[in-house]
Image (cartoon, rainbow, N blue to C red):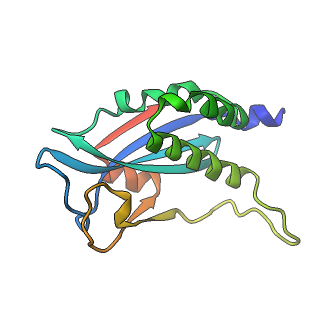
Amino acid sequence: MDIEQHHKLTRIELFAVPASAAIHGSTADCEKPLYIILKLSCQRDCGWGLCSILAEGKGVDLVRWGNFLRCIRQCSLSEAVGVTQVTSQSWQPSQFAMVQTALQDLQATLYPPVLAGMFRQENRKSKLLHLSVEQLPGASSSPPAWISMDTDWLVEHSVAYYSIL
């Protein structure tokens, strides 16, 4: 099987998770701080990215917000990197940073550095993401939050979810 074909994006998922109770201070009462978490999957492997937004009113429409990701749908990993570089000029900087981080994380998962005696561990523990206060606009100086990069945890704690197959 061609390595490019094997490393094709099989799923793109977005989760909108409310900022932790430890983080307060949106700029207006109608704005709600949210973390948008991106999960890019190639078969069983995945890469993660994050950005923060202030959602107005009742929340965020992830279908509309995440529409920019359709351009990398069903791309190989290397194609997605190339497409991202070309199309990112029409994206918000936080969207570009989130996608770039997820692609780099996925690439590091698929192509880990080879060390003598190293083997690939299939059942890796789920990641925890440490969110500093600076990562959310208008955040107070409260302690940082932690978010589990586990799909089950994210589904349980998300206020919105969007999947692109």
The residue furthest right is 116
The foreground one among 139 and 1 is: 139
The residue furthest left is 29
Residue 165 seen anywhere in this rendered image of the structure: no
The foreground one among 10 and 62 is: 62
Image x and y of residue 124, in percent: 62, 63
| Left or right of 77 in this view: 135 | left
| Left or right of 39 in this view: 147 | left
* 62 is higher (above) or lower (below) than 22: above
Residue at 72%, 50% in the rendered image: 110
Image x and y of residue 20, in percent: 28, 62
Residue at 81%, 37% in the rendered image: 3
* 118 is higher (above) or lower (below) than 93: below
Residue 117 seen anywhere in this rendered image of the structure: yes
The foreground one among 21 and 42 is: 21
Image x and y of residue 10, in percent: 60, 34
Quadrant where the N terminus sits is top right
* 26 is higher (above) or lower (below) than 75: below
Q: How many marks?
A: 0
Residue at 72%, 38% in the rendered image: 7
Image quadrant of residue 64? top left
The foreground one among 50 and 111 is: 50
